[in-house]
Image: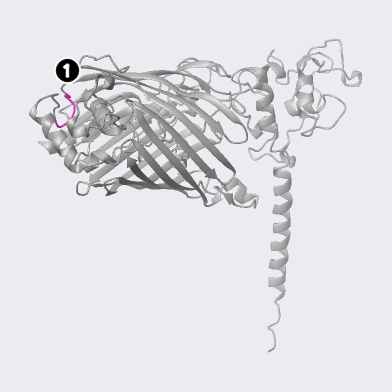
Amino acid sequence: MRRAPFPAHRFGIALARVAAGLAVVTAAGTASAEPEFPGMIQELFQSSCAPQCTLCHTSPQGGEATVKVGEKYVDGTNPSHRGYGVFVANLGARGATALNKDTLVAKLKLLKDDPCQKEEALGSTADRGPCDSDGDGMSDYLELDSEPARDPDVSGVGASSVCPAYGCGASIGTLPRDADATGRAGAVMAALGVALVLARRIRR
Amino acid sequence: MRNDTRGRRPLRTRGPAWRVLLVAVSLLGVLFTTRPAHAYAWMIRHGYSGCPVCHADPSGGETLTAYGRAQSDLLLRTRWDGKNPEEAEPSKASNFLWFLETPPSLLLGGSVRLATAYTDKISVFPMQLDAYGQLRVGKVLVGGGLGVIKVPASSPYGRTAQVTTAQGEAYNLISRTHYLGYDFDGQYTLRAGRLNLPFGLRIPEHTMWVRQATRTDRESGGQHGVALAYNAETLRGEVMAILGNYQINPDMYRERGYSAFLEVMAGSRAAFGVSSFYTYAKRDRVTLESNIARGAHGVFTRLALADPLALLAEADIMTDSTRSLGYVGFVQADYEVIQGLHGLVTFEWLDQGYLKSAQMQNEPRTKGAGQTEVAPWFSADWFFLPHMDVRADFIIRPDNFEFLGQFHAFL
């Protein structure tokens, strides 16, 4: 039996599918490159939860292609300990090795005391303070070591890596209350009240 | 003994009602209890559909009423005196702390669980150190519990009930429930505060997937809100407006929505129910994902298949805005070998749903996340003295085997 000729446009579609599949597979590999990082950070700092991928990535799914970039050195001539102004860039610049799961903990520990600005080519090295990527006055190390952890890339408490705090009145700062929640809660309570009244009337 | 003002059937120690009940108990023979203060198949056998007869919580759990204490002493434990339950009177050991008779308006209780677990190493730890109670002033109820925990920083247990604010591995005061309530007419109870979620079967195995995956266990799943419970002869239910757990901060982690169940008695030895919950939070406290809507909707049943054999079952579908549709459930057979000694076989299953983010990246489906995961439990529970039991669980889950041994005293 003679096979039907394979139409050119079908070949194109098949090729596109193969390419897309390869792209997805490749992307999947990079996206889960270092899934241990959040847990390792949590363990080192004994945080109540692991940080989100957005601590170092622009996407909550992580991935090598989404690592935050800090190409420009901040205030090189006016020491502020901000370094590259991006936490993951400053973290990667600690020590002489690349950032990977074997060096992560050592690099995190270096954030505690290692001077953030020590490359004379990039600016003044007079100030020997540790990195404060967001320039809020609290070093990156202390922000991560806070309980609950603060976001070292956002001035103040931040939100992207913040953990829930447990206990009555436990506070992580001045994060605003969800304004819509009050309305929703009120509506639900009102509905419950109506249900109660109706139930009693039905019983009568 | 005291009059039980909340139950449908007033209890008098030596009154006719009490004697009638004891005779009824003797005629019905060996009961198929599961564990105290948690599961109530034996109440089904007696035609009771409501939990308030034995518990302060209208949907069951924790604080026992005077009637519940008496039943625990008479029917739950192994009787070393050889007396039939119908011939015996509740002993003083059925009182709070085994000796203290409290006024009728005041119910006190507690739970101490000492556990040993083996997975890859043996650990011994206090699983539960809770005291609880309820004060009734007319139709007004004030109740709740206080306890102590010490868990690692990343532990999923106990944290959500913290009163004190230590976030690391330190001792913390907890309160799993606290509420103000009003009894309308013995059938309707309105409560506001931190409450157990009215959903599914109230089993003591808080790590069983059906409770853990839906976060409806009584260990950590409580939420603040307002709940209306209804308990009648053949119908019981509770609906709760979940206003968020105010022991979690900041507000974006608080889930808001509803939880409800309705159970119908089918004859005197079977009950069938449906339950449903749905919540929304700006951020999930476990996954830290944003704008999470979670829900679970399912059916459950309690059956007495024979005098000593009870069957509990629940099946739920789970919705999560970050996952495909999931499902969870369990079937548990409880055989009472002799009074007080129970053998249990449980099968549980879980598929939390395939992560949508994983789907985008074409990651494989795994057991529990896109594929069904099944685990058997083999357990024995022996109520060897008044308000005391020892329990052993062999839990065979795909990723690990766990032995859990417990000594439990309910005060």
Q: Is residue B166 left or right of residue B20?
A: right
- Residue A47 visible in image: yes
Camera-nearest residue between B215 and B208:
B208
Residue lying furthest front in this view?
B82
Residue B377 pos. (x, y %): 47, 44
| Res B184 quadrant in image | top left
Residue B155 pos. (x, y %): 55, 28
Coloring applied to the structure: one colour
Q: Give the residue pinned by disc 1.
A: B138
Residue A62 pos. (x, y %): 68, 39
The crowding category of the residue bearing disc 1, from other C-alpha atoms within 10 Å (few below 14, some 14 to 19, many at least 20), is few
Residue B229 pos. (x, y %): 25, 33
- Residue at disc 1, secondary structure: loop
| Res A57 quadrant in image | top right
Q: Quadrant of the N terminus of chain B?
A: top left
Circle 1 chain: B
Q: Quadrant of the C terminus of chain B?
A: top left
- Residue B233 visible in image: no
Q: Is residue B30 magenta?
A: no
Q: Is residue B131 above or below residue B185?
A: above
What's the amino acid at mark 1?
A: Gly
- Give the residue at x 37% y 40%: B342
